[in-house]
Image: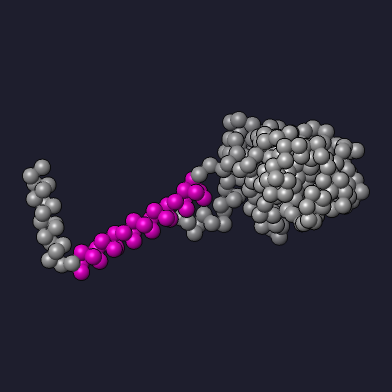
Amino acid sequence: MDNLLQDIRYAVRSLFRSPALALLAILTLALGIGANTVVFSVFHAVLLRALPYASPDRLVLLWTDFGPDLPQNWISGPEFVEMREFATVFEEIGVVVPFNAGVTGAGDPEEVGAAGASANFFQVLEVSAHRGRLFQEGDDAPGAPATVILSHSYWKRRFAEDPEIVGKKINLSGFPFQVIGILPENFSILHPDAQFPRQVEVWTPLTTIFGAIFGVDEYSRMPRGSHAMRGFGRLKPGVSPAQAQQDMDAVAARIQEKSPNYYDFEGWGITVVSLHDDLVEEIRPALL
């Protein structure tokens, strides 16, 4: 202890003898420590922190591969059906398509970010409703009623957190949709696609949207060449993305056998990528 006190006294005397050098050293240390703290905070938030979903390590994105010129393409309705039919390593495979919708009624008309989702999409993410319910099997079946789910922020902003909103109807792009549920407060959709709205305020069954566009409300009857769906998958426990890729390679081969004329080219396949890895792919090198 005596030696330590002696060292401290010597250090203090040295600092007073060279105040400019001491100030420079202190500023350098402060800037270095501050910069490293900021960089590590960003590094942790982007690369290390888990995604805000249940068991995020089991969430993957599914892309169709159309060769070197289009290695990451979206999914068509028939491909979605076939992936669910032939794949063996997923608990669920769901799809979503972003778009914009005009909302009228209960306030001034406005255009908001929207998304059409398969009935099982929220099961893929393992999300529960804050109020009411989310989509369930049959909500995207042919002839199903037009339903809509509101984000928590939109429910709060436009409907003043009206507890009776569930069961009422709102107009989206001129058509009536019945509100069936409210999403949790902190829920957001994470996807590397820059076309996704910054905030999705309303969610509808995907077949409702495609029915309006193509006149068909069944995934299998949608145009095989209309690739608009963003694919999400939840792996079964213990299955790695590499194992899932092997499974989807076999699925791609079966899809090609089923429709040889459409996939008559080199490079066709289905790519499986960890959701987390796909989200940070562009920024990882810079942060490292």
What residue do we see at 34% from left, 56% from top? 33
What is the x, y in percent for residue 222?
87, 47
What residue do we see at 18% from left, 67% from top? 19
- State yes or no: residue 31 in magenta: yes
- Whether residue 270 appears in this view of the structure is no
What residue do we see at 12% from left, 66% from top? 17
For residue 64, side relative to residue 45 (left or right)? right
Tell which of 195 and 133 is nearer to you.
133
Q: Main secondary structure of the magenta part?
A: helix
What is the x, y in percent for residue 5?
10, 48
What residue do we see at 20% from left, 69% from top? 20
What is the x, y in percent for residue 284?
52, 54
Quadrant of the image occupied by residue 146: top right
For residue 114, side relative to residue 173 (left or right)? left
Q: In the rendered structure, which segment of residues is drawn in magenta? A: 20-48
Q: Is residue 138 above or below residue 213?
A: above
Q: Is residue 30 above or below residue 114?
A: below
What is the x, y in percent for residue 118?
77, 40
